[in-house]
Amino acid sequence: MGNSRVRIIVSIAAMLLLAKVSIGAEALKLRHFQSVYADDKEAGFRSPEGVGCDGKGHILVADSGNGRLVRFTLIDGKAMPDKEIKVPELSFPVRVHTNSKGEIFALDGRQKRVVRFSPGGGFLGRVDAAGSPPPSTVIPRSFDIGKDDSIYLLDVFEGRVLMLSPEGKFLKSIYFPAGYEVISDLAVDGKGTIFLIDSVKAMVYVAAKGSGKFSPLTESMKEGMKFPATITTDAHGNIYLADKNGGNIYIIGQDGSFKGEQLTMGWKEGQLRYPCQLCVNDKGEVFVADRDNNRVQIFSTVR
């Protein structure tokens, strides 16, 4: 009986944590307005795990099962396909980002490497993290591009974040926090703050620009989340988490305050099955790689 009471109390506390919105925080809602399923030749996506966006109205889809990237341009609010990138050097893209020059970066989930393309899609080579301290083996699970075009690699082999110059040369490393379980993703905001998501603990860690270590931003939220595995930020300081196993999107503030639980698991428009990478553009539009529904969904944010 005693253990049952403890579990009930813990569950109630977790629900209160997820339901609580800090004073002055504005709850956000996601409103679906478009889904993208295929390229201009009606070749459908197959298990897309990545989506990236930039400030020029471009969307990049990592069409993982088809081993390619597909670029779209937003025209009058509608995503129009305009380019396919398919090369032997990228066999299974799972993450995609662009820098300020329009260069395209993609993580190959099978070959465990990040490759770079010109804005036109020409292959430029791989990001090797030249000059990184031992060990020489680097296994990136994810990556992000900073506002200054610095590259941040999530190296799960050594349990660290590698910060690289725009050219891919080593600058600095920060090791994962003590007691972590599974760090699945990272995000870098416009101030150079780095965020990590521990999927097992359902916990966000943070390292301010110039800091040499990560500290907890939130308490564990695992009583309310199943497996939050991807993270991104927007220009207003909001942090978005995609719960892969739960089919939800969660929004928290940079102070750790909870700002809303979004969406539900399912097949209908606006529902998710195994959401992967997230991206938020300058207009506040949210793009979600909805892997098991073979599509990318686009949402607007409303308050």
Image (spheres, rainbow, N blue to C red):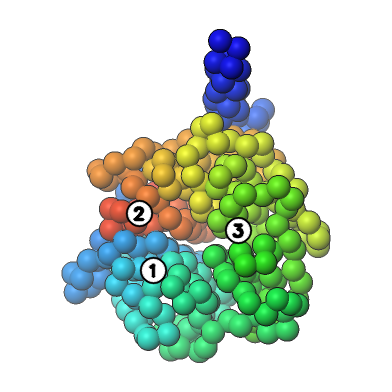
Foreground: 31 or 293? 293
Left/right of residue 125 with respect to residue 276 in the rendered view: right
Quarter of the image holding residue 79? bottom left
Distance between mark 2 and mark 3 Cα atoms: 19 Å
Distance between mark 1 and mark 3 Cα atoms: 18 Å
Left/right of residue 71 with respect to residue 279 in the rendered view: left
Q: Secondary structure at mark 2?
A: strand
Q: Earlier in the sequence, mark 1 or mark 3?
A: 1
Three-letter residue code for mark 1: Ala
Residue 203 place in picture, x, y as percent? 62, 43
Q: Secondary structure at mark 3?
A: strand
Count of numbered marks: 3
Which disc number belongs to residue 62? 1
Left/right of residue 65 with respect to residue 191 in the rendered view: left
Three-letter residue code for mark 3: Ala
Identify the residue position indicated by label 3 in the image: 187
State the residue at coordinates (35%, 54%).
Answer: 290
* Mark 3 surroundings: few (<14), some (14-19) or many (≥20) residues within 10 A: many
Q: Earlier in the sequence, mark 2 or mark 3?
A: 3
Foreground: 294 or 55? 294
Identify the residue position indicated by label 2 in the image: 290
Foreground: 41 or 31? 41
Distance between mark 2 and mark 1 Cα atoms: 11 Å
State the residue at coordinates (20%, 71%).
Answer: 43
State the residue at coordinates (58%, 75%).
Answer: 100
